Image (tube, helix red, strand yellow):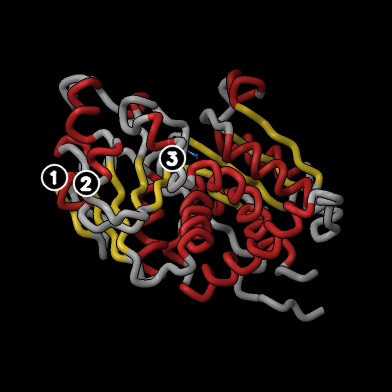
Amino acid sequence: MEKVSASLFGRSVVALENFSAADIRLILDAAYKFKQIIRRGVEKKLPNLRGKSIVNLFYEPSTRTRTSFELAGKYLGADVVSITSGTSSIVKGESLRDTLRTIEAMGVDAIVMRHKAEGAADFATRAVSPIIINAGDGAHAHPSQALLDLFTIEQRKGRLAGLKVAIVGDILHSRVARSDVYAMTKMGMEVHLAGPKTLLPRFFAFDGATLHERIETALRGADVVNVLRIQLERQQAGLFPSTREYARVFGINDERLKLAAPDALILHPGPQNKGLEISSAVTYAERSAIHDQVQNGVAVRMALLDLTLNGGEA
Ligand code: NCD
């Protein structure tokens, strides 16, 4: 049968660089539809992916991404199994290729994977035949996070094009920043990046974004402020003098936010280091959309799974 949205059907999602503005629009529009269905709350289960199976393969910790991909698959009627590195043969030293091939042999349709190595998801697309959805590979890409950031901004602000966004903090280690810059510039947003010099990339690979060493210039007039987590697990000691010093110079609090637009929306991908990169008052403020991001993550991941595995056909 003819698929209505052939452009995403059968495609792996490793990074958004291969996705056009029209592809991203398709995903956001589908997410609106799924969000309404989830919110109805009566019967969330849809038949779209009935008979399909999805494995979540997570080599790195995750609360939000793994749970929301799992729920997204289940709400669409797929069978979903989650494997974490601590409870699988990965601890016995099985290689990534062998683990992928084992999962493939069981006849799965998609593998949602998170891995500490940049390029792991791309490697998987060449090693096995199921659709691969990248749920984060090292500091490289986190496409579903960027999509849910866009969705959250559009829901709260009513548009994307023309908005100014400041992405602040640990840019160097952030796969979220990398995917956000691509997705946001593609959708016509103006993107500014700021962080301590030691947490900015040495080789600038953020086409279309403006880099600032002073957070103040990035925040000025921003419509959206995306606060990144300081990725303590990915950095060697000594990238900033102390956590107190970081909070003082770069932490997002009410005082510093006076530079941004009065109605600036606050995002954070989570998990937060409260009191370090963001204050509690900002997290729980009216203009914070951090809680919305988590809610929207399920709808956006439903859209991604439905479009890639089913072509978006009802
Ligand atoms: C992000 C990640 O894992 O890249 N978290 C998430 O998926 N919600 C950001 C982070 O860990 O800082």
Identify residue for label 1.
Answer: 214
Nearer to us of marks 2 and 3 is: 3
Q: Are marks 1 and 2 in contact (CB under 8 Å)?
A: yes
Locate residue 95, reporting x and y percent.
Answer: 55, 31
Q: Is residue 274 above or below residue 313?
A: above
Look at the image and tell me whether residue 208 can be seen: yes
The quadrant in which residue 254 appears is top left
> Which circle marks residue 194 in the picture?
2
* Kind of residue at disc 1: Arg
State which quarter of the image contains the N terminus. bottom right
Badge 2 element: strand
- Do the CB atoms of the residues marked 3 and 1 lie less than 8 Å apart? no
Q: Residues within 10 Å of mark 1 (few under 14, many from 20)?
A: some
Label 2 residue near ligand 1, CB within 8 Å: no
Q: Residue at x 31, y 54 (%)?
A: 262
> Tags 2 and 3 in contact by the CB under 8 Å rule?
no
Front position in the image: 141 or 132: 141
Q: Which residue is mark 3?
A: 285
Mark 1 → mark 2, Cα distance in angstroms: 6 Å
Residue 48 is situated, as x and y percent measured from the top left of the image, at: 81, 61
The residue depicted at 21 percent of the width and 41 percent of the height is: 195
Give the amino acid at mark 2: Ala
At horizontal 66% and vertical 24% (from top left) the residue drawn is 88
Amino acid at circle 3? Ala
Mark before the other along the chain sequence, 1 or 2:
2
Q: Nearer the viewer, residue 182 or 267?
A: 267
For the point 27% across and 44% down, which residue is it? 257
Q: Residues within 10 Å of mark 2 (few under 14, many from 20)?
A: many
Q: In the figure, 267 relative to 88: above or below?
A: below
